[in-house]
Image (spheres, rainbow, N blue to C red):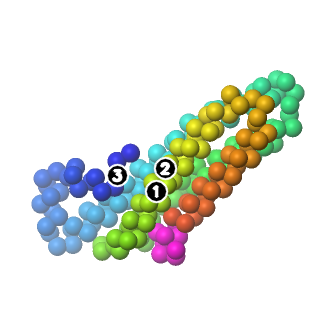
Amino acid sequence: MPEPRDHAENRNIIERILRHIPGFRGYLEKEYRRDSDELQRIWLADRLQRSKRAIDEAARPLVDTGQIDLLPQVDRLRGRLDKFIWQLRSAMQGYTGFFDLVRIDEAVLDRVYELDVALMEDVQTLAIAIEALPSRGGELGTALPELLNQIDNLESQWSIRVDTLKGLE
């Protein structure tokens, strides 16, 4: 995943010239921030979506062996994951109120990038843990609540990010 600040290195000559036109530089910066935000949200949602196959793989043996007491927790995990994926995919592109500012407080922007990095790391950790579910077999009873707690943490991080972008943090 490219860093949002890497856009400056990948600009073509026309974009470099246009950046010198009064007002246009701010427009370009705003668009780069929006693009980076959207790419990051797509990556997060896609990574979690790919991990969901492992939930079904872990649930099949439960049904086959008659251990249906864990199925409600499996369904809850799947539902919570779907909800979080939906939040990522349905968020407004670029959080217009935040990204429309031509001059943005660098400290706030740095805070958003820090939150983004933490989100990416925690999503990756969660996805790996979900993908390990089928191999945990008899430990599913303890693994499922742990995964639900990780989703709670991600939802909290996402709320902080949304509040930061809205200027409410």
**Horizontal placement of 20 versus 40: left or right?**
left
- Residue 127 lies, in percent from the top left, at 58, 40
61 displayed left or right of 111: right
Q: Marks 1 and 2: in contact by CB < 8 Å?
A: yes
Q: Amino acid at mark 3?
A: Glu
Task: Indicate yes or no whether the magenta region holds residue 163.
Answer: yes
SS at mark 1 in the image: helix
- In the picture shown, does residue 30 fall above or below 43? below
Which residue is farthest top?
64
Q: What residue is rendered at 17% in x and 57% in y?
A: 15
Q: Which residue is mark 3?
A: 3
For the image, the number of numbered tags is: 3
Which kind of residue does numbered mark 1 sit on? Asp
The quarter of the picture where residue 153 lies is bottom right
**Sequence-first tag of 3 and 2:** 3
Q: Is residue 75 visible?
A: no
Q: Earlier in the sequence, mark 1 or mark 3?
A: 3
Magenta residues span 162-169
Residue 134 seen in the figure = yes
Real-space CA distance between mark 2 and mark 1, rounded to the nearest whole angstrom: 6 Å
Q: Is residue 22 above or below residue 90?
A: below
> Which residue is tagged 2?
120
- Is residue 114 one of those drawn in magenta? no
Q: Would you name the residue on which mark 1 appears?
A: 116
- The secondary structure making up most of the magenta span is helix
Residue 128: x and y, percent? 58, 38
Q: Residues within 10 Å of mark 1 (few under 14, many from 20)?
A: some
For badge 2, the amino acid type reads: Met
Kindly identify the residue that appears in the image at 38 percent across and 71 percent down. Answer: 107
- Residue 115 screen position, x and y as percent: 48, 60
